[in-house]
């Protein structure tokens, strides 16, 4: 590896070291808390289940009253979910439904498939065990137990758990505020005529979509003319009230690349060369209190660098405790005979056979590869991959969450 380059892991560690987590906390309705980061540990307000209840539709009874299969018991009451029965008389059964409270005196529920209804009686065709099909009070969660830790990015199932234990509102960190803008006289918005030398501004759409998926508040400052004064002016406006300024391309040393001198004039900038492919160049700095990250301009490089570096930065800024994506170990259904000296992240797709295959064109401008793929294969530097080897796969499901 070039000694002037940072390794991928070094760059990630350095970037996370610059994180300034948001401090403001707001309470939101639990109904709308999915995707937010929890600011304070949450504890159950109830036992879960809140009472002994039936785990299925069937008959509640005393196990001792059914010594042999085929025992007949009179049905003394009917208890649907949401109702409370009365004490079960010895030698009788209660028709009961899933979730209904177990009546006092009963110690077992026999599923209806093992019973026969016969007028006012039930024939129990099994010898039940005490406690069968009964969910005990507090069996899953006890009152006061911690159910959700601070730093958790709330999933729909986490929000459901909060609701299940009676939490109507949740304290969460405020959303991260991100300013984005594009530079380049060659950039044209879709729907406009494409002039000679022009390109449609796909990165603007890419970054806005990625930021929205992470729950950020995004303000788009549009396309900035290739002038130093204009770039400095938009940087000052973008820094106001934002945690991060995010751009792609333009952070170079060419005569028409004004982002680098503009950031240096308004704040500070550190240019990194990272031993990763795609995505070698990255810029980090600060502008009037806001963090600045400049991504490479090629669409695939911008996409991959965002997922692997900006995403953890933003999650940590939100206060999330887990920022590293989960990886899978899968079988390579491809050969990779010409390794690079840099660590490579290849657009790949998990197939129906449990292996992973590559998109044919791994070029950094092949944006269609990001749509075809459902994840990235992580290839260490200087590593040859033969078909059948085990490779590390990063699914989009985690990277885009």
Image (cartoon, helix red, strand yellow):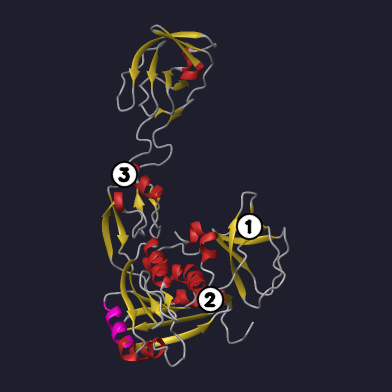
Between 296 and 150, which is closer to the camera in this rendering? Answer: 296
Give the x, y percent position of residue 171.
29, 57
Using the rendered view, name the quadrant where residue 50 is placed: top left
- Residue under numbered circle 1: 356
Instruction: Find the residue positioned furthest to the top.
Output: 119
Q: What residue span does the magenta drawing correspond to? A: 231-240
Give the x, y percent position of residue 272.
51, 83
Give the x, y percent position of residue 75.
38, 11
> What's the residue at 38%, 7% (across, down)?
120
Which disc is residue 45 wearing?
3
CA separation in Å, label 2 and label 1: 22 Å
Rate crowding at label 3 as few (under 14), some (14 to 19) or many (20 or more) other CA atoms within 10 Å: some
Magenta segment: does it hold 356?
no
Magenta portion: prevailing SS class? helix
Q: Nearer the viewer, mark 3 or mark 2?
A: 2
- Residue 326 at least partly seen: no
Q: Secondary structure at mark 2?
A: loop
> What's the residue at 68%, 58% (across, down)?
333
Question: Looking at the image, do the residues carrying marks 3 and 2 touch, with CB atoms under 8 Å apart?
Answer: no
Quadrant that contains the N terminus: bottom right
- Residue under numbered circle 2: 279
Q: Secondary structure at mark 1?
A: strand
> What's the residue at 39%, 33% (across, down)?
137
Give the x, y percent position of residue 76.
35, 12
Using the rendered view, name the quadrant where residue 270 is placed: bottom left
Between 345 and 54, which is closer to the camera in this rendering? Answer: 345
């Amino acid at each position: 590896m070039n000694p002037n380059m940072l390794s991928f892991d070094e760059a990630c560690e350095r970037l996370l070291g610059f994180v300034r987590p948001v401090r403001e906390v707001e309470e939101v309705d639990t109904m709308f808390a999915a995707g937010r980061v929890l600011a304070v540990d949450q504890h159950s307000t109830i036992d879960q289940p809140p009472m002994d209840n039936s785990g299925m539709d069937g008959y509640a009874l005393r196990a001792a009253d059914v010594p042999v299969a085929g025992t007949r018991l009179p049905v003394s009451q009917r208890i649907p979910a949401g109702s409370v029965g009365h004490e079960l008389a010895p030698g009788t059964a209660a028709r009961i439904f899933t979730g209904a409270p177990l009546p006092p005196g009963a110690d077992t529920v026999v599923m209806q498939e093992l019973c026969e209804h016969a007028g006012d009686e039930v024939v129990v065709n099994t010898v039940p065990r005490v406690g069968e099909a009964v969910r005990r009070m507090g069996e899953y969660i006890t009152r006061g137990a911690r159910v959700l830790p601070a730093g958790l990015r709330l999933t729909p199932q986490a929000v459901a758990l909060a609701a299940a234990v009676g939490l109507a509102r949740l304290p969460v960190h405020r959303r991260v505020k991100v300013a984005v803008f594009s530079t380049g006289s060659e950039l044209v918005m879709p729907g406009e005529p494409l002039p000679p030398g022009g390109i449609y501004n796909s990165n603007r759409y890419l970054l806005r979509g990625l930021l929205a998926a992470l729950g950020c508040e995004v303000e788009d400052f549009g396309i900035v003319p290739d002038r130093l004064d204009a770039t400095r002016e938009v940087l000052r406006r973008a820094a106001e009230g934002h945690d991060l300024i995010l751009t792609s391309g333009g952070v170079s040393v060419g005569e028409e690349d004004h982002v680098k001198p503009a950031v240096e004039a308004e704040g500070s900038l550190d240019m990194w060369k990272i031993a990763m492919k795609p995505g070698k160049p990255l810029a980090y700095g600060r502008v009037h209190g806001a963090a600045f990250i400049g991504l490479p301009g090629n669409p695939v490089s911008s996409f991959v660098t965002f997922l692997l570096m900006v995403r953890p930065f933003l999650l940590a800024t939100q206060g999330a405790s887990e920022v590293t994506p989960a990886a899978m170990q899968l079988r390579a259904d491809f050969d990779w005979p010409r390794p690079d000296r840099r660590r490579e992240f290849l657009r790949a797709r998990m197939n129906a056979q449990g292996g992973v295959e590559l998109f044919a064109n791994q070029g950094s401008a092949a944006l269609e590869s990001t749509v075809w793929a459902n994840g990235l294969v992580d290839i260490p530097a200087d590593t040859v991959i033969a078909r059948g080897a085990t490779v590390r796969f990063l699914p989009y499901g985690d990277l885009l969450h």
